[in-house]
Amino acid sequence: MVLGDRMADTPEKVMRFLENLFEASNIAAARDFENLKSFAMTNGHTGDIQRWDWAWYSEKLKKELFDIDDEILKPYFSLDKAEKAIFSLAGSLYGIKFIPNDSIPVYHKEVRTFEVYDKDDTFLALLYLDYHPRAGKNGGAWMTSYREQHKDLNSDQRPLISIVANFTRASETRPSLLSLNELTTFLHEFGHSLHGMFSKCSYESLSGTNVARDFVELPSQFMENFAYEKEWLDTWAVHYITGEKIPEEIIHKVKQASTFNEGYAFNRQLGFGFLDMAWHSITEKNTYDVYTFEKEALKRTDLFPEIPGTNMSVSFGHIFGGGYAAGYYGYKWAELLDADAFSYFEETGIFNRETAESFRKNILEKGGSEKPHDLYLKFRGKEPSIEPLLKRSGVK
C-alpha cells in the first residue's frame, strides 16, 4: 500500500533495484573490507575486525591514502562567497535573481530575506536564510515552507521558503568558513528550496516538496554534485587570505576521497533495505524468532563477525515508527536518480540552460501533481540507469 504512491511502486520493483545494486557492488564491498583489514593488521590490530573497529581504522586509512581533511578545504569556502556562488549558479541554470529586502519582518535579527524573481522579472518567492547557531535553536540544517505555493481562485500564491543551518560564525580574524560537508549541506537544502520556489501547482498538498518520499531528495541531492565540479568551484572558491583558487590537486583528492569505502557503504545501506523489505513483505500470520529472521535477511550483506544477543530490528526506528516502512530503499533510489540526472548535465554541459529548463519544467515545477516516474521520463527521456551511480561511487 505504501509503495503504491512511490516512484518504485511495487515490491517487485524495489527488490529488483536492491538486487541489481547488490550484484553490482558486493565485490567492491568485499574489497573495501579486505583493504581495511589488511591496513589494521599492518598497524598492530589482532583478531577479527569488529564493527567498533571500522570507523577508527577507516579514518586512519583515509588520511594515509588522501592526506586531506576539512581544515585544508575550509579556507576556500567562505560562507559569503558560497552564498553568492550558489545564487549565481541558480542564475546560470534558470535565469533567476535574488534581491535582498531588509524591510520584511523576520523572527530573529540574524535572518536575512531575499525576493526571488524569474528571468522575465515576475515574482517567484521569498527566501529566508538563517545560518548560525544560537541558544534555543535546533541543530542541523533544513528547508521549510512558511507558505506553500498554491492557486487561490485566479491568484497564484507564491511560496515563502526558508533555509536554516548551523554554520560556524565569523570571528574577528576570519570569515565564516564552511567544511566540504557544510557546503554540500547548503547546496542540498538550496535544492529543496528551488523545488519549493519553482512550484506551479493548484493545491498546497501537491506543490513544492510534497512529493513521493523516494522522489523528494532528487532536487536536493542533484545540487550536491556541483561541490565536486572544478568548473563551478573555479568561479568562486578562493583562499580567504591569499585569493588563490583551490589547487586542482586538492579537488582531485576530494573527488577520490568521496568514493573511499563506498563499496562498504553500499553494502550497509542495502542490508538495511533488504531487512526493511523482509519485515514488510510478510503476508502470512506466523510466529517469528526475530533474531533468526534478521540474521537470514542480512546474511549476504553482513561482513562482520556475529555478536550473540544483538539485534537491530528491535531498535530500527526508521522502518517501524519513522515513516520509512517499506521505504528504506529510498535513500539509494534518490542517489540513483540524482546521479543519473546529473550525468545528463555532464553530457550536455553542467551549466546547460536547455537541460536545466527541462529539469525545472518537468521536475521542479510539478511537485506531486503527476506521477514521479512520468515526470522523470519527461525530463530524461528514458528510465533511470544505475550506471552513473556506480561510476560516481567508484564501485565499478
Image (cartoon, helix red, strand yellow):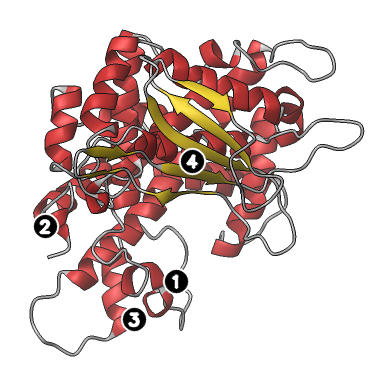
Residue visible at 70% across and 46% down in the picture = 132
The x, y position of residue 233, in whole percent, is 59, 16
Disc 3 secondary structure class: helix
The x, y position of residue 52, in whole percent, is 60, 63
Amino acid type at image mark 3 = Tyr
Foreground label between 2 and 1 = 2
When asked about the image quadrant of residue 90, the answer is top left
Task: Verify CB contact (< 8 Å) between mark 2 and mark 4.
Answer: no
When asked about the image quadrant of residue 351, the answer is top left
Task: Verify CB contact (< 8 Å) between mark 1 and mark 4.
Answer: no
Residue behind mark 3: 291
Disc 2 secondary structure class: helix
Label 4 Cα neighbours within 10 Å, binned few <14 / some 14-19 / many ≥20: many
Disc 4 secondary structure class: helix
Residue behind mark 1: 306
Q: Judge by depth and name the residue closer to the eye, 201 or 310.
A: 201
Residue behind mark 2: 4
Amino acid type at image mark 1 = Glu
Foreground label between 2 and 4 = 4
Sequence-earlier tag: 3 or 2: 2
Q: Quadrant of the N terminus?
A: bottom left
Sequence-earlier tag: 1 or 4: 4
Amino acid type at image mark 2 = Gly
Residue 393 seen in the current view: no
The x, y position of residue 207, in whole percent, is 27, 45
Residue visible at 33% across and 38% down in the picture = 218
